[in-house]
């Protein structure tokens, strides 16, 4: 059993050997560069700030980065597959890839919701928010949302972005994912406005953006000011018994 635990790349570890960290360094950089190269060529941007912490001499930082390494590498491979499928209009298979990655990132979030912000934002909450919106985006392309019934369905489904963001605010007090969804909602609104001025979806998207932004401020500002809760300091690695408090310290 102990051997199986040691061989499981997704298992939680209190520390990592030099060989394990070396493997994560190589595979993380290789998979991220793969996604970055394909994404840039297809006008899609990426982020890699987290990778630097794998090389940190601070053992807590490198352990925190190493623990999420397997999920991050899998996310990179899924994103690589999605980009290639999207540009070749293979929307049905691309949707399946996104859904699989959504499960991967959800498992990552639930297992490592207490990671420091330098890991949580670029590796956990950011990719999860993007993948959720991408599922809706690819789904619309998949069914060819141009007829009336599809447009009505799209106007209903777009509200799931608000529900998703508020869920993480209420359940985890995670204002990073709600803020990321705020940005994505704004992008959706601007895009839809450019397509058709007389339409509901860009209006709904702006409403979702506004509600999420205000809700994010309601959680983030009191915490930052230390009035209700204290925002966790960057670099802190918290214990497992605080799994359900991803961004906030106890008073």
Image (tube, helix red, strand yellow):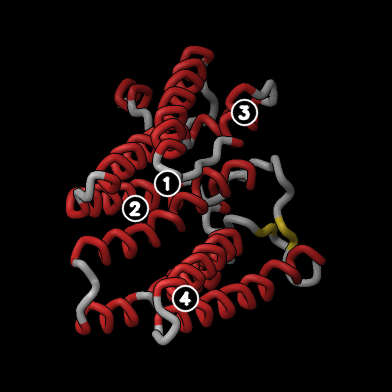
Q: Where does the N terminus fall, quadrant-wise?
A: top left
Q: Position of residue 214 (x, y in %)?
A: 64, 77
Residue at 70% x, 40% y: name it: 235
Q: Is residue 106 visible to the viewer in this orientation of the structure?
A: yes
Disc on the earlier residue, 3 or 1: 3
- Spatial CA distance of label 2 from label 4 is 28 Å
The mark closer to the camera, 1 or 2, is 2
Assign a secondary structure to mark 3: helix
The residue pinned by badge 1 equals 108
Disc on the earlier residue, 3 or 2: 3
The residue pinned by badge 4 equals 193
Q: Position of residue 161 (x, y in %)?
A: 43, 71
The residue pinned by badge 2 equals 102
Assign a secondary structure to mark 2: helix
Disc on the earlier residue, 1 or 4: 1
- Spatial CA distance of label 1 from label 2 is 10 Å
């Amino acid at each position: 059993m102990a051997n199986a635990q040691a061989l499981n790349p997704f298992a939680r570890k209190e520390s990592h050997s030099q060989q394990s960290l070396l493997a994560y360094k190589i595979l993380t950089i290789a998979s991220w560069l793969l996604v970055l190269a394909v994404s840039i060529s297809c006008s899609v941007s990426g982020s890699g700030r987290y990778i630097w912490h794998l090389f940190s001499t601070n053992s807590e930082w490198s352990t925190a980065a190493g623990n999420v390494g397997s999920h991050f590498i899998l996310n990179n491979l899924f994103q690589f597959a999605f980009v290639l499928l999207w540009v070749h209009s293979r929307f049905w298979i691309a949707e399946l890839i996104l859904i699989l990655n959504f499960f991967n990132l959800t498992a990552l979030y639930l297992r490592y919701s207490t990671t420091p912000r330098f890991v949580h934002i670029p590796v956990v909450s950011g990719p999860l928010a993007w993948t959720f919106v991408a599922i809706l985006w690819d789904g619309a392309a998949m069914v060819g949302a141009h007829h009336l019934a599809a447009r009505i369905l799209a106007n209903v489904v777009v509200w799931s972005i608000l529900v998703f963001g508020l869920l993480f605010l209420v359940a985890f007090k995670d204002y990073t994912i709600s803020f990321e969804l705020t940005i994505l909602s704004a992008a959706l609104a601007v895009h839809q406005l450019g397509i058709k001025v007389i339409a509901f979806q860009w209006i709904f998207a702006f409403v979702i953006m506004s509600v999420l932004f205000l809700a994010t401020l309601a959680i983030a500002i009191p915490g930052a000011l230390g009035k209700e809760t204290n925002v966790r300091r960057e670099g802190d690695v918290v214990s497992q018994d605080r799994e359900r408090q991803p961004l906030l310290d106890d008073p």
